[in-house]
Amino acid sequence: MIASDLLDVPVLDADGTHVGFVVDLRLVLDGPPDGPLARPRLHGLVVSPRSRSSFLGFERSAVRAPWPVAHLVRRRHRGTFLVHWSDVASVPTPGEAADPRQEAAVVLARGMTRYDARL
Amino acid sequence: MKKLLAVALGILTAIGGFLDIGDLVTNAVVGSRFGLSLAWVVVVGVVGICVFAHMSGKVAAVSGRATFEIIRERLGPRAAGANLVASLAVTVLTLVAEVGGIALALQLASSVDHRLWVPVAALAVWLVLWRVKFEVMENVTGLLGLALVGFAVAVFLLGPDWGALLDQALTPQVPAAEGQATYWYYAIALFGAAMTPYEVFFFSSGGVEERWSVKDLATSRLNVLVGFPLGGLLSISIAACAAIVLLPGGVQVDALSQLLLPVAQAGGKLLVALIIVGIVAATFGAALETALSTGYTLAQYLGWSWGKFRRPVQAARFHVAMIVALVVAVGVLMTNVDPVAVTEYSVVFSAVALPLTYLPVLVVANDPEYMGEHVNGRAMNLLGTVYLVILVVASVAAIPLMIVTRAGA
């Protein structure tokens, strides 16, 4: 599986309700050394309710300039949350769509927690 | 002393490199129809390109990343891909116009039909891209392009009514013979000519080619802030030549040769010869820059190794992309399209595509992860945001105005 299999994919909760799109992946570097960095591990998915567009880096609360752009991007992505990888029930299998008419989706586990996605 | 020379050289090449076929044609057309009543747009465009080039140059110097690498990183593959298609289309269209411009200028010098010159011009461009070092290429075309100072000389020799010219420029009015929509259509064309996207791809990638670092920021700022405004002054003098000679005679510019009428009247054969040298150098230089820009954007998006600082064998796909772009340009010109008409469309589509590249550069210039302590200050951001609004308005208005005015007819 590669990052592109997850990015831009719609997200459903356990009841099949649409909750947003995967706009980013959060990785942590806590694995054993692998080249110059520690091996990354997938920590969770950033899910934005309305938009597949990029956050342009404004997910970091310290980045606020230029103000009008920051404001518009944050507004477009309001309600964005982070789900831990352990709260993901299923992901689309590459090249194997269950129903060709339906778009592949990430399905979240029942009782999953929505974390604040800001950095 | 050596440093002073380097700075002077940078400024001179920036002046000579500012003008391309888009500036030449659009300013002459506008001058012959609107006098100097659109000169203010050149000023707005020059300040805009200063802001844009300054930011992208700073990003290149501090982070070592060129514009399209940033676009790919910040927008993600899908949005950046759409951006690439639009930017590449405009850049190739501009390349077609520039190669056509070289051919037209050589036709003026030789009376040999421009269609015969097109393959020769394209081959010459390719040879330079393949063999000549980046700095040499930049400096030679930039310095020879300075011959276009002849347009400013011509304005003085024509001995115009300065008061009337100044009046046209400072209290702009739509001429009685032209409609409001046409006026604004040409305003956008002139704006697009001053701020073509390829200039920024080229400028930022050139910064990486020349291995700029934070130390070079001051020099790069000086080149932009002095060179581009002086280039803009040459733009206005082209419009002034047309306004003095062609506007009263009711001559509308639709061929490159008409640019030379006021020059011939003012300074005779010698000045005409000088201007032709200038036009060949300016269009040749811009053809190199646009061809390189097609390679830069494609390679930076797809992660290929790129740059003239590498030998062609180490950046093979980059060089192939430029060859393909040149072959496309020759092919388009061989269909017998009028290069002047291509130019007029290319500047308008430049204005349409500009926000796509401007926004990511503005965002990254504010990103401490890329820029560290060199993020934009408040004043720069105010100016940058004002221009973002101008660019978006021009971009949205361009196509409707093109339809309403039937491309400025």
Image: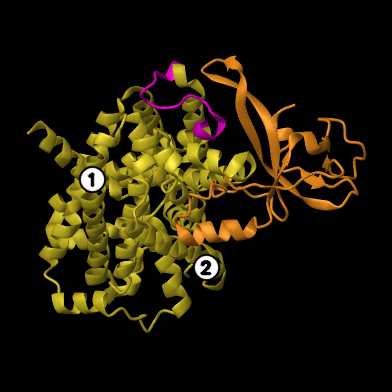
Chain colours: A orange, B yellow
Q: In the rendered view, would you say A18 is above or below B243?
A: above
Q: Quadrant of residue B291?
A: top left
Give the secondary structure at mark 1.
helix
Question: Which residue is rendered at x = 35% and y = 72% of the image?
Answer: B33
**Chain letter for the residue marked with disc 2 in the picture:** B
User: Type of residue at label 1?
Assistant: Asn
The answer to whether the residues at label 2 and label 1 have Cβ atoms under 8 Å apart is no
Measured as percent of width and height from the top left, residue B25 is found at: 35, 57
Camera-nearest residue between B110 and B101: B101
Reply yes or no: does residue B307 show up in magenta.
yes
Crowding around mark 2 (Cα neighbors within 10 Å: few <14, some 14 to 19, many 20+) is some
How many angstroms separate mark 2 from mark 1 (CA)? 32 Å
Measured as percent of width and height from the top left, residue B385 is found at: 42, 61
Camera-nearest residue between B52 and B11: B52
Q: Is residue B372 visible?
A: yes
Which SS does the magenta portion mostly show? loop
Q: In the rendered view, would you say B240 is above or below B323?
A: below
Which residue position holds label 1? B223
Measured as percent of width and height from the top left, residue B63 is found at: 39, 35
Camera-nearest residue between B398 and A118: A118
- The image quadrant where one finds the N terminus of chain B is top left
Label at residue B397: 2
Q: Is residue B113 visible?
A: no
Question: Which residue is rendered at x = 41% and y = 74% of the image?
Answer: B183
User: Type of residue at label 2?
Assistant: Ala
Question: Considering only order in the chain, which callout, 1 or 2, is on the residue closer to the N terminus?
Answer: 1
Looking at the rendering, the stretch of residues picked out in magenta corresponds to B299-313
Q: Is residue A92 left or right of residue B90?
A: right
Q: Is residue A93 left or right of residue A7?
A: right
Measured as percent of width and height from the top left, residue A41 is found at: 66, 26
Whether labels 2 and 1 belong to a single chain: the reply is: yes
Question: Which residue is rendered at x = 26% and y = 52% of the image?
Answer: B228
